[in-house]
Image (spheres, helix red, strand yellow):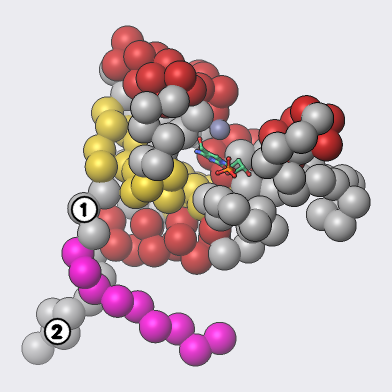
Amino acid sequence: MKREDYINWDEYFMGIALLTAMRSKDPNSQVGACIVSPENKILSLGYNGMPMGCSDDEMPWEREGAPLQTKYMYVCHAELNAILNSAHNNLKGARVYVTLFPCNECTKAIIQSGIAEVVYYGDKYHDSDSSIAARFMFEHAGVRLTPYKPTGRRAELEL
Ligand SMILES: Nc1nc(=O)n([C@H]2C[C@H](O)[C@@H](COP(=O)(O)O)O2)cc1CO
Ligand SMILES: [Zn+2]
């Protein structure tokens, strides 16, 4: 008889997004994204980090101060990295699992790439202008927004 306590698809893909986020060097928010085809094949992964060639040790990770001295000017978001990392994959009809609700800039890239559904875990910036603009665009573009429902299952990995 087959085992019954295997993880379901949503747990699997959000779990991979959470594991991917652990690669982030951002001291405040570690974000992961996992793009999945309608056949449940993983098409791409990404986490928030500095652009290639921009050393994590030389770039600022500050949240406040002069704009040029903050991370916001430079960091590439998890969703955008996942889309750019998927260069040869067709994302039409795909879903993206994100550990944090997308910003307005990534929302444009998500919509333009043909992704049809966003499954999100955190939503800590729900009331920001960025999130409001993102929801406005998603709604008009017909992209489904699905809050991830944690199952309470805990996964322990010995690394
Ligand atoms: N959906 C997102 N994906 C992301 O990859 N990020 C990144 C950008 C920054 O590196 C960090 C947010 O930093 P903070 O403002 O919470 O200290 O997370 C942020 C959001 C939120 O919109
Ligand atoms: Zn973004």
Q: Is residue 130 left or right of residue 65?
A: left
Mark whose residue sits in front, 1 or 2: 1
Q: Which residues are magenta?
A: 151-159
Q: Is mark 1 within 8 Å of ligand 1?
A: no
At horizontal 30% and vertical 16% (from top left) the residue drawn is 139
Whole-angstrom CA distance, mark 1 to mark 2, is: 25 Å
Outermost residue, top side: 140
Q: Secondary structure at mark 2?
A: loop
The local crowd at label 1, few if under 14, some if 14 to 19, many if 20 or more residues have their Cα within 10 Å, is: few
Q: Which mark is residue 149?
A: 1
Could you say where residue 59 lies in the image, as x and y percent from the top left?
85, 46
Q: Which residue is mark 2?
A: 2
Of 88 and 112, which appears nearest the observer?
112
Instruction: Determine the residue positioned at 37% across, 57% down.
Output: 14
Q: In which quadrant of the rendered view does residue 8 lie?
A: bottom left
Give the main secondary structure, helix, strand or loop, of the magenta stretch.
loop
In the current view of this chain or complex, which residue is farthest to the front? Answer: 65
**Label of residue 101 in the image:** none
